[in-house]
Amino acid sequence: MEQFFQLTLLGLLVGMIYALIAMGLVLIFRCSGVLNFAQGYFALMGAMLVWAFASQLGLPVWAVFILSLGGAALLGLVVERLTIRPLIGQPVFAIIAMTLGLGVVLEAIVTFVWGSEGRGYPENILLPTGTVHVGDIGLPQLQIYALVIATAVFGGLMFYLTRSKSGLAMQAIADDTEAAESLGISVRSILSIAWVLSAVVAMIGGYLLGSIIGVEIAGLPQFGLKAIAVMLIGGLESLTGCLIAGPFVGFCEYMASGYLDPLVGGGLKDVFPYVILIIVLVIRPYGFLGWKRIERV
Amino acid sequence: MGLPCGTYNVSYAKDMAIVRTKTQWIMLGVGLILLFCLPQFLSTAWLAVVNLICITLTAVFGLAIMLGYTGLISLGHSAFVGVGAYTAACIATKLFDGAGWSFWIAIPLAGIVAGVVGLAFGAPSLRVKGLYIALTTLAAQFILTWVFMHWGFLGGVRGIRLDPPSIGGITLGSEASWFYFILVVTLVMGLMAKNLVRTRVGRAFIAIRDNDIAASGMGIDIFRYKMLAFFIGCFFAGVAGAMWGYYMGIAHYEHFTLMDSVWYLGMVVIGGMGFMMGAVFGTLLIRLLTEATAILAPRLPIVGEAQAATLSYFVFGLVVVLFLILEPRGLAHRWEIFKASYRLWPFSY
């Protein structure tokens, strides 16, 4: 029973990070129908920036976070402007291929500049690593922070989307691009904002992951792909869907790795989100909360 | 699709012929002779590169049919290549216990098994329009790699070792003997692909890619043809995988990663959608660029030992990104332009 609770909590908390990264994906998908396969590399880049500012340059904590957030925003802006905007109007596969190519380039850049070995954050910017005991169950403090941050980001994004002018414009574009354009909304600038926000959210996710598993070139980008699975399971257009699907997928993943792994020889954690993805696609292709705009042939 | 000056379609057979003029026949003949003489000119190391290019090309033909002609994006192509490799390995070592003739069954069967596995993954998402097929094939990539790794029958982390096959008493041991075999298979598969897309089926694929509503209005059963395209694409992947398994002497999951799938995809994109020549150009360009970076990297002053390996990835990614921005129609489009202007020269139109 204790294992069950432990796995549940771990799963839910890792799931919150999936949800966080997936939210960035949803933002972009809603306004442009683009699925960003490079999101994991954005997270990697963000995690690496934090490490570089903190460890290599030895900056104080506040400067590290301001600079990293700025760096991530700049990355989103540059990527959108240079690689995504020229492809507006191209077929879907071109943009998928573009984001995949982008991922390869970003990974190569990170390897070039910082080398490929995994590394951990220095003490001063690491989230506290102690354990809080609730009854018999030990809760890693680190992951409680992850939960709080993910929820805060979700709240912030929701607030932005429903209360600010550009957030509402983003909703309008998601609903009907041409109608929004004819009402004087600049689709281009909103798209830029979406990419910037997405890169910033990915950076935060990358930082959390970096605190938990270390900044790893081999491991981190995988989370971006799992976040794509989470996004589909939650419904491609729904932020709330991410928040439900993320913990759901994390929970299933850890349950599978805890109870099914001994039966089948291990490694289920890496594939289980994709198994759920296929099941969801068969039963409910618009996911938990997605728009029912599915067209069948 | 301009024809050379003074060439007209006067009969149906002529209209359908791939090789039209005497010059083309001569170029084809000389080209084939040169191709078959390659082992005379190339060192063993370069011959290995050519072999790899040919195997890759077979897989890329499959992806070109799926992506370039039918518009189905597959992010799991290398996993299907892997299915082919593992199938061939199982047939050769487990089913027939290394019998010499098992080779002949293994290669087509590897294609069929890969096709069926592909369909199992493709079926749920091919009914739904949009980018769902990309997500299912992504899932297929991870799930299949996991199966390769954890299903004890497939040898687990060690993979399955394969003995080199022998054809009519000649054991395929040296690079040169492999070259002839792989070249013949690749040429046959290429011709099949080229002809397939000119038939009724191929035209149906193109119609679905261009406008699926119009296609279904013309009486094309979209779901059936999408499944067919997926099966054929995976069949090519499986055949390529079987060759890969035999050639490498091992079927191992590390050869069939997501990164490899992205590379196949990049080759199709760079080559250009909807042209079989595009697959050839894309594969050649990427593979040769990789070789070039491998040779050049150690000589560049700024690049360290560890970074040299990354350089080929960087170059690949950059080439894909630049092609998508600057020439989204790919190298094949440039080739068509070149052919048209070359045929008109020295006249301006």
Image (cartoon, coloured by chain):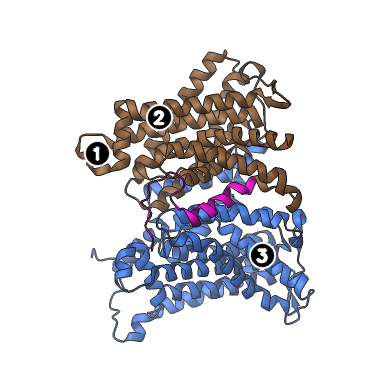
Chain colours: A brown, B blue
Q: Nearer the viewer, mark 2 or mark 3?
A: 2
CA distance separating discs 2 and 1: 20 Å
Asked if badges 2 and 1 are on one and the same chain, I answer yes
Amino acid on which disc 3 is placed: Ala
Asked if badges 2 and 3 are on one and the same chain, I answer no
CA distance separating discs 2 and 3: 48 Å
Mark 2 falls on what kind of element?
helix
- Range of the magenta residues? A270-297
Q: Position of residue B143 (x, y in %)?
A: 62, 54
Disc sitting over residue A180 in the figure: 1
Report which quarter residue B156 is drawn in. Answer: bottom right
Say above or below: A163 vs B123: above
Q: Is residue A85 left or right of residue B193?
A: left
Q: Position of residue B105 (x, y in %)?
A: 67, 78
Q: Position of residue A21 (x, y in %)?
A: 51, 35
Mark 3 falls on what kind of element?
helix
Q: Is residue B72 visible?
A: yes
Say above or below: A164 vs B19: above
Q: Which residue is mark 2?
A: A158
Say above or below: A132 vs B289: above
Q: Is residue B303 left or right of residue A77?
A: right
Report which quarter residue A192 is drawn in. Answer: top left
Badge 2: residue crowd in 10 Å (few <14, some 14–19, many ≥20): some
Q: Position of residue A14 (x, y in %)?
A: 60, 34
Asked if badges 3 and 1 are on one and the same chain, I answer no
Badge 3: residue crowd in 10 Å (few <14, some 14–19, many ≥20): many
Q: Nearer the viewer, mark 3 or mark 1?
A: 1
